[in-house]
Structures are given as C-alpha cells and as structure tokens.
Image (tube, grey):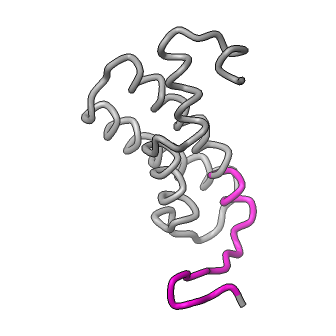
Amino acid sequence: MLKTQYIRTTISNDIFGTEYASILKNIYAIASGIGHALGYGDNFQSVLMSNAIREMKCFIKNVYKMKRNINNSAYLGDLLVTGYSVFSRNRTFGSMIGKGYTVKAAQI
C-alpha cells in the first residue's frame, strides 16, 4: 500500500537485526560528527564508516543469527545517511561535542 512510482518499500523479517542496526548507526554517527568537528578529513570518515559496517555486521550476526544482507538500506543505507548527512541529529550532536560543547549543551 505504501509503494508508488517514487517510493519503494520493502518488508524485512529481521526485526532484531534492523533494531540493533538502528541503534548502532546512531553511535557511529556521533563518532562521525566528532571526527568532522576535529577536522579529520574524508579519508577518516570513509575508514570510520567502513569499520562501522563491518562491526555492525559482526555484532548483529553474533547477537541474532539469521540470513541477512547487511548491504540493504535498512542497515548500510541508514548508517551512511546518518553518518554523513549534515541534517543528521546524531552527527550534529557529535559535531558539537567535537567543537567542545558539553553533552548537556549539545542536547539542546
């Protein structure tokens, strides 16, 4: 019912995996924001995201074993947009931490 020519939706049976991925990507996005604010370049960001997806895959595989493709949008796509987008709240939060804001001040 939610599919149009502009929007493609998919259904996943991996409830636990997608939930864990959605939590982990927020942590990686905060790290991405901190790195950006500290002036680390694109190479750092690419290594961070590469390691994040590898760690996410290993973690989810060990916590809840089932066949899944970690390169799907629910995992990798969500991680990349949250880690790279300037509109990401978690990346912005990390950026503020990297600039020296306190956690309390960055939460506002």
**Up/down of 60 relative to 68, above or below:** above
The residue lying toward the viewer, choosing from 65 and 107, is 107
Quadrant holding the N terminus? bottom right
Reply yes or no: does residue 66 show up in magenta: no
> Total of numbered circles in the picture?
0
Residue at point 65% right, 68% down? 66
Q: Position of residue 10 (x, y in %)?
A: 61, 80
Q: Position of residue 96 (x, y in %)?
A: 54, 20
**Up/down of 36 relative to 3, above or below:** above
Residue at point 70% right, 24% down? 107
**Up/down of 3 relative to 70, above or below:** below
| 55 displayed left or right of 17 | left
| 30 displayed left or right of 104 | left
Q: Position of residue 79 (x, y in %)?
A: 51, 50
Magenta-tinted stretch: 2-21
Dominant secondary-structure state across the stretch colored magenta: loop
Quadrant holding the C terminus? top right
Q: Position of residue 100 (x, y in %)?
A: 52, 8
| 43 displayed left or right of 7 | left
Q: Quadrant of residue 78?
A: bottom right
Residue at point 39% right, 35% down? 48
